[in-house]
Image: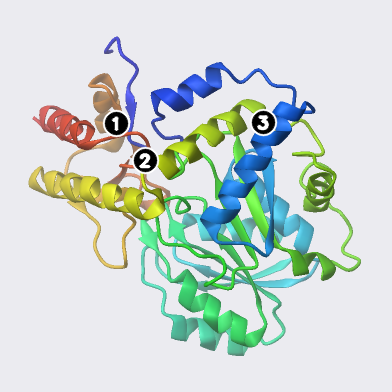
Amino acid sequence: MTTRRPILLTPGPVQTSAAVRGALAESDFCHRDVAFRELAARVVRRLTRLLEAPDHDLLLLSGGGTSATEASLATFLAPDDEILIVSNGAFAERIAEVAELLGARPRQLAYGWGEAIDPDDVERFLDSHPEARYLAMVHHETSVGALNPVHRVGEILHERGVRYIVDAVSSVGAEELSVARGHVGLVIGSANKCLHGVAGVSFVAVRRSWWEALGEIPPRSLFLDLRRYRDALAEGETSPFTPPVSAIVALDRALEELDESGGPEARRAHYERLSGVLRQGLRELGIEPSNGVPRSSAMTLARLPEGVEFDAFQRELREAGYVIYPAKGALRASHCIVANMGAVDLGTIEGFLAAVRRVLA
C-alpha cells in the first residue's frame, strides 16, 4: 500500500477539494440554530437556481440518491398506480424495483443497457398506456455512462399532461439540465457526484402544483414522507428530523466552488477535456471505451483487455494509489468504470494512466 490515501476516480463518492474537507472539519452546528438554518437556506437557493426550478420546492434529505428516489415514489405514487419507466441501465431498473416494492405497477420501455433512447418510442409507449399519470427516466445512467434525452422527452410529456420524474443524481452540476425547459415535475439529485460534495445528503425538487394532486394518498413512511419536509420548509426548518449537518455544510462550500469555477458549463468543459485524455489513453493501453449513445463527460465505461480480471486489476490500481469502480450486472467481469468527476485535474488523469500502464505490464 502507498502511504497516501488513494485518489477516487469513482462516480460517487468523489474526490473532494481541500476546501470541502475543511468545511467538514468546521461543521459543528446545531441544526435548530439560526446559523445552520441560514446556511441550509443558502444551499436551497443555490440548488434551485442551478436546476432552473423556480416553481419547485427544494427539499434536503438524508441519504443517497436511492433514498431520495424512494421518498419521491412513496409520497406521490398511490398503491396500484401505473408508472412508466424508460430504462437503459441499472438505475432506471432500480426505480422500477422501488415502485414495485411500494405496490405500484411499473411498466418499462426497456432498451439494452447503454442503448440510445428514441423519443418516438416514448410516444408510442405512452399511446399504449394512456391511463399512466407518471413517467420516470434517468438523465445520466451511470451504470453505462449514457446521457438520455430528458428535455425532448419532457416536451412530449408536457403535451400529454403526464407528470415527469427525472433522476439527475449523476448529472446535476455538470451536464446540461434545465428543469423548467424539460418540464420536469420532480427531479432527484445528490451532493456527492458532479457537485463535488460528500455522501450523506440528497435532494428533491417538487413542482408546487404537485402537492395539490396528492389527494388521499396515505403516508407509507415516516422518515421518507416528503410532505413532512415540505411542511418543515414552510416553517423555516431544514428538515422535520435531524438533517445530515456536516454533509450540508460541505455541500454549501462545494456549491460555492462550482460558482467560482464558472458554473456547470465550465465544469462540463473541464470534464470533457479530462475524459478526452482519459479515453484516448485507455484506448492506447488496450482498454476500449464504450461507444454509441451520447456519453457522459464525467465517467467512462470501458472493456478490459482479454485475460485481465477486474478484481485483480482494481486491487493493483489501489495499491498504486487510485480507486476505480466495478461495472454492474453482466458487465462486471469484463468492464470497469473510471470517473473524472470530483476534484481531479489533468495531472491526476495522466498519473492514473501511467499507473494503468505499469499494472498491465
Q: Is residue 335 above or below residue 210?
A: above
The earlier-in-sequence mark between 1 and 2 is 1
- Mark 1, residue position: 314
Picture disc at residue 350: none
Q: Quadrant of residue 213?
A: bottom right
Indicate the amino acid at tag 3: Pro
Residue drawn at 28 percent across, 53 percent down: 269
Query: Left or right of 209: which side holds 12?
Result: left
Whether residue 9 is visible here, answered yes or no, is yes
Neighbour tally class for label 1: few under 14, some 14-19, many 20 plus, Cα within 10 Å? some
Name the amino acid type tagged 2: Pro
Residue drawn at x 48%, y 70% is: 150
For label 3, the crowd category at 10 Å Cα-Cα, with few meaning under 14, some 14 to 19 and many 20 or more, is some
Residue placed under numbered mark 2 in the picture: 326
Residue in view at x 69 percent, y 21 percent: 29
Q: Quadrant of the N terminus?
A: top left
- Disc 1 and disc 3: Cα gap in Å? 31 Å
Number of numbered callouts drawn: 3
Report whether 75 appears left or right of 153.
Answer: right
SS under mark 1? helix
